[in-house]
Image (cartoon, rainbow, N blue to C red):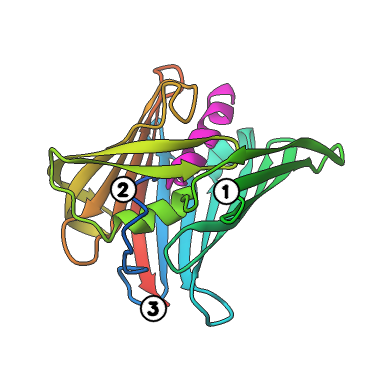
Amino acid sequence: MLAITRVRPAAMSVAVSLGLALAQSSNREPAASPAGRGGEVFQYRVEWRLIHAGDAKLTWEPAAAGGPGWEADLVLQSVGLVSRLYRVDDRYSAVLDEHLCARDSLLRAQEGGRRRETRVTYDRERRRASYLEHDLVKQRVADSHEIDIPACVHDVLGALYRLRRLRPEPGQSVEIPLSDGKKSIQARVEAQQRETVRTRAGAFQTVRYEAFLFNNVFYRRSGRLFVWLSDDERRLPVQVRIRLPFYIGTVTLELEKMERS
């Protein structure tokens, strides 16, 4: 159970992160999504220590009002033995502008006996991010503060979709502005090599990327974060892997199914 409590924040940074804090300089205007103006739904199997530990669902849609911008949602739930030991039900949503810059994010997290709601508001004009976390069990504010941010900053999901518009070749690296409302950094991402990845959704030719977020960069914990995108026009997020110290282990998100909405 101790190991599971330590894995969740890392997975949400990705997977949260589908951790995935990857992109290029925000001065460049990317196309908003590899899917055009359509939506996408990705379903992932989460494995930890060779067992099926959970399921994740990532949804990407145009703004509900039909105007410019995007809405992204990530649901991460534990299953089976892991859920009996330590139940996780995390629901993260983000609102992005037409350039994938973060506007608002909301995390509703139930982890064991803890229940929290965290909202981050990104103010481009003031260049400030406001962070507000509520403890829903004790019915009190657990944390509240503001930090400085660039005029355009990405949350992890917006950064993932930005990366999908790019094609950095192995050996190249890029930096992007990234924030979760608690910290703001220039995240370095390195394109490493081409690999064949096999998941329940099939076999994919991919490019492996590493995002340098751990080891006192974005998170104090030691670890490594890898993302595999399909090496074609779709640029599908095929796999995400977080390698943490041996006493915690490796968490892998593998693509099971993808749908267009």
Which comes before the other along the chain, label 2 or label 1?
1
Which residue bears the numbered disc 3?
37
Which residue bears the numbered disc 1?
127
- Amino acid type, callout 3: Arg
Give the mark toward the camera: 2 or 3: 3
Element under disc 1: loop
Query: Which residue occupies the foreground of this view, 237 or 87?
Result: 237
Write down the region rendered in magenta.
1-19
The residue drawn where x is 48% and y is 40% is: 13
- Amino acid type, callout 1: Arg
The residue drawn where x is 29% and y is 53% is: 238
The percent position of residue 261, horizontal first and vertical second, equals 43, 77
Q: Main secondary structure of the magenta part?
A: helix
Q: Is residue 14 magenta?
A: yes
Element under disc 3: loop
The percent position of residue 44, horizontal first and vertical second, equals 40, 53
Left or right of residue 134: residue 91: left
